[in-house]
Image (spheres, helix red, strand yellow):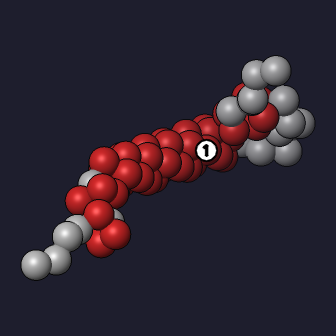
Amino acid sequence: MKVKTLVELLESVDTTYLTESEKAEAIARAQAAEYTAELIASGLAWVKKALVGKRTVMNTANHSHA
């Protein structure tokens, strides 16, 4: 099952009460919100990958003391 984007959801809503510029603004805001969410998710995935890669270095249980 494919998840619909915000733009697809907006296009399925009755927007006869909106002007064309209001509809275009809503679509632009939806696209910006989706881009921001994808950017944040990508950043978090990168941080998680970086931290998991360093996990053995930061794990104090594996260090031997003199």
Q: Position of residue 53 (x, y in %)?
A: 31, 48
Query: Alpha-carbon neighbours of circle 1 within 10 Å: few (<14), some, or many (≥20)?
Result: some
Q: Which residue is drawn at 23% across and 59% down?
A: 57
Task: Report the residue at 23% width, 68% height from top.
Answer: 63
Give the residue furthest to the right: 14
Nearer to the camera, 50 or 10 = 50
Residue 21 x/y as whole percent: 61, 41
**Residue 12 drawn above or below residue 38:** above
As drawn, the residue found furthest toward the top would be: 1
Q: How many marks?
A: 1
> What x and y, as percent, mark residue 50?
30, 50
Q: Is residue 10 left or right of residue 51?
A: right
Q: In which quarter of the image is residue 30?
A: top right
Relative to 6, is 43 above or below?
below
Give the secondary structure at mark 1. Answer: helix
Residue 15 appears left or right of 65: right
Q: Is residue 17 left or right of residue 41?
A: right
Q: Which residue is drawn at 37% across and 51% down?
A: 52
Q: Quadrant of residue 31?
A: top right
For residue 37, say whether it is visible: yes
In the picture as drawn, the residue positioned furthest to the left comes out as: 66
Image quarter hosting the N terminus: top right
- In the rendered image, the quadrant that contains the C terminus is bottom left
Residue 1 or 55: which is nearer the viewer?
Answer: 55
Say which amino acid is labelled 1.
Ala
Image quadrant where residue 24 sits:
top right
Instruction: Report which residue position mark 1 lands on.
Output: 30
Residue 20 shows in the view: no
